[in-house]
């Protein structure tokens, strides 16, 4: 029962995260670092942002296999259905937010910050569930476990690498910078901080969601 509840919380977090990514993207100030490559590609090819997100996620899973080799476990393949769900959630929320097209810079900035808060809460729920990780975080974990690097520093390096790659792809395909703006940097700086704030302010939530259920299960078993 607890495992099911954790997966439901993770699924909710996944949907909220996709909503946050779409909100940031619709602000027209860039997108989140992990979505930067899929977004640039979606602006230049017929696939949607969600479809390129799925393809990019599969690439990251393949890279994990190369990095981890025999340490890549069968359970890591759970990232595939998670990535598919996340990609389609992004396409759904992009459609739901299709009417959002802020014109003034101030409104764009407000939308961006609001999107960061939504994404930060989604990330917090995913961490709270503690059942799986998206391929981006799993890739960073694979690197840190293989070469004993610091997770935080590796995550920053990963985000910077992805964003720079998106810039290169933008100039390669569109011959100009598109899809990557100051909002990408703001999102990179804010989302993790916001997720940590939710974690500290909602410290009571894990016991409320899971531990009481565990106690109830134990009592029922006895």
Image: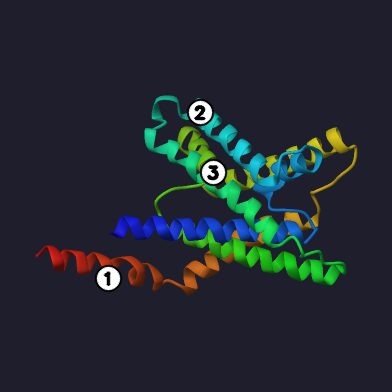
Residue 4: quadrant of the picture? bottom left
Marks 1 and 2, Cα distance to the nearest angstrom?
A: 39 Å
Label 1 crowd bin: few (<14), some (14–19), many (20+), radius 10 Å: few
Say which element carries label 2: helix
User: In the image, what residue occupies the spot 70% across and 42% down?
Assistant: 38
Q: For mark 1, what is the residue?
A: 212
Q: Which of marks 3 and 1 is nearer the N terminus?
A: 3
Query: Number of labelled discs?
Result: 3
Residue 216 position, x and y percent, is 21, 69
* 145 versus 111 height, above or below: above
Q: Which of marks 3 and 2 is nearer the N terminus?
A: 2
> Which numbered mark, 1 or 2, is in the foreground of this view?
1
* 195 versus 175 height, above or below: below
Q: For mark 3, what is the residue?
A: 83
Residue 60: quadrant of the picture? top right
Front-lying residue, 1 or 114: 1
Residue 39 position, x and y percent, is 73, 45
Q: Is residue 187 visible?
A: no
Q: Is residue 124 visible?
A: yes
Q: For mark 2, what is the residue?
A: 67
Residue 17: quadrant of the picture? bottom right
User: In the image, what residue occupies the spot 63% across and 52% down?
Assistant: 90
> Which numbered mark, 3 or 1, is in the foreground of this view?
3
C-beta proximity under 8 Å, tags 1 and 2: no
* 122 versus 164 height, above or below: below
Residue 157 position, x and y percent, is 64, 43
Q: Is residue 23 left or right of residue 145?
A: right
């Amino acid at each position: 029962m607890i495992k099911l509840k954790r997966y439901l919380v993770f699924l909710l977090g996944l949907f909220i995260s996709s909503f946050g990514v779409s909100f940031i993207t619709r602000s027209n100030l860039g997108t989140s670092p992990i979505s930067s490559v899929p977004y640039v590609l979606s602006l230049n090819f017929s696939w949607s942002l969600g479809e390129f997100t799925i393809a990019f996620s599969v690439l990251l899973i393949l890279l994990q296999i190369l990095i981890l080799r025999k340490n890549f476990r069968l359970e890591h393949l759970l990232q595939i259905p998670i990535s598919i769900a996340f990609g389609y959630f992004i396409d759904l929320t992009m459609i739901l937010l299709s009417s959002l097209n802020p014109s003034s810079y101030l409104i764009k900035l407000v939308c961006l910050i609001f999107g960061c808060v939504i994404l930060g809460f989604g990330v917090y729920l995913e961490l709270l569930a503690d059942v799986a990780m998206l391929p981006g975080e799993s890739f960073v974990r694979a690197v840190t476990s293989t070469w004993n690097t610091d997770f935080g520093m590796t995550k920053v390096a990963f985000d910077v690498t992805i964003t720079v790659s998106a810039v290169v792809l933008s100039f390669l395909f569109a011959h100009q910078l598109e899809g990557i703006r100051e909002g990408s940097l703001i999102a990179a700086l804010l989302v993790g901080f916001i997720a940590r704030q939710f974690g500290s302010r909602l410290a009571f939530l894990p016991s409320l969601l899971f531990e009481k259920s565990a106690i109830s299960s134990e009592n029922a078993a006895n």
